[in-house]
Amino acid sequence: MALRGKARSITIDDRTYKWIVSDANYPSLEIWIQAEHGDGQKLHVPLPHGGRPTPEEGAITPRLIEWLIRRAFSRGWRPNERGPDFRLDRDYWYGETD
């Protein structure tokens, strides 16, 4: 199923992804990422309390989206294969960085 709402695009290593920030669970925010073409797994990233990626960073930027995508790949996300949504929980904010 495609992302709902107006999605932004990002290209990483010659692959394009669509991403949105959702407030469906307001006051919490979530980031959803999916490969541009196909019905593969969506990446679901619930944001820490307050909706900011880190206490120091207040914006959701393309740089952050790229980092999330690379992090998800390292943890097993398969955006071109069907399957349940792949969730990156809050521990990734505080774990080791790539």
Image (spheres, rainbow, N blue to C red):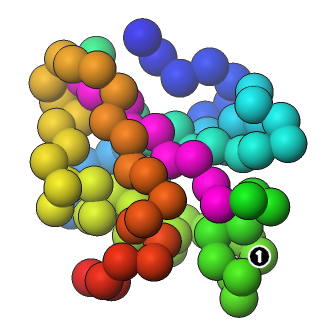
Query: Image point 72% across, 67% down: which residue?
Result: 52
- Tell whether 55 sits left or right of 90: right
Q: Quadrant of residue 82?
A: top left
Dot 1, crowdedness within 10 Å: few (<14), some or many (≥20)? few
- Tell whether 67 sits left or right of 65: left
- Image vertical order of residue 54 relative to residue 75, above or below: below
Q: Position of residue 26 (x, y in %)?
A: 83, 36
Query: Image point 38% across, 41% down: which residue?
Result: 87
Q: Position of residue 95 (x, y in %)?
A: 36, 77
Which residue occupies the extreme top position in the image? 1
Does any portion of residue 60 appear in the rendered image? no
Q: Position of residue 60 (x, y in %)?
A: 66, 65
- Image vertical order of residue 80 relative to residue 21, above or below: above
The type of residue carrying mark 1 is Gly
Indicate yes or no whether the magenta region holds residue 45: yes
Query: Image point 27% across, 64% down: which residue?
Result: 70
Which residue occupies the extreme right position in the image? 27
Residue on which disc 1 sits: 58
**Nearer-the-camera pick, 29 or 19:** 29
Indicate yes or no whether the magenta region holds residue 68: no
Q: Position of residue 34 (x, y in %)?
A: 39, 34
Query: Image point 30% across, 83% down: which residue?
Result: 96
Does any portion of residue 5 appear in the rendered image? yes
- Tell whether 14 sits left or right of 91: left
Q: Point out the image quarter for the N terminus.
A: top left
Which region is colored magenta?
40-48
- Image vertical order of residue 60 relative to residue 44, above or below: below
Quick one: SS at disc 1?
loop
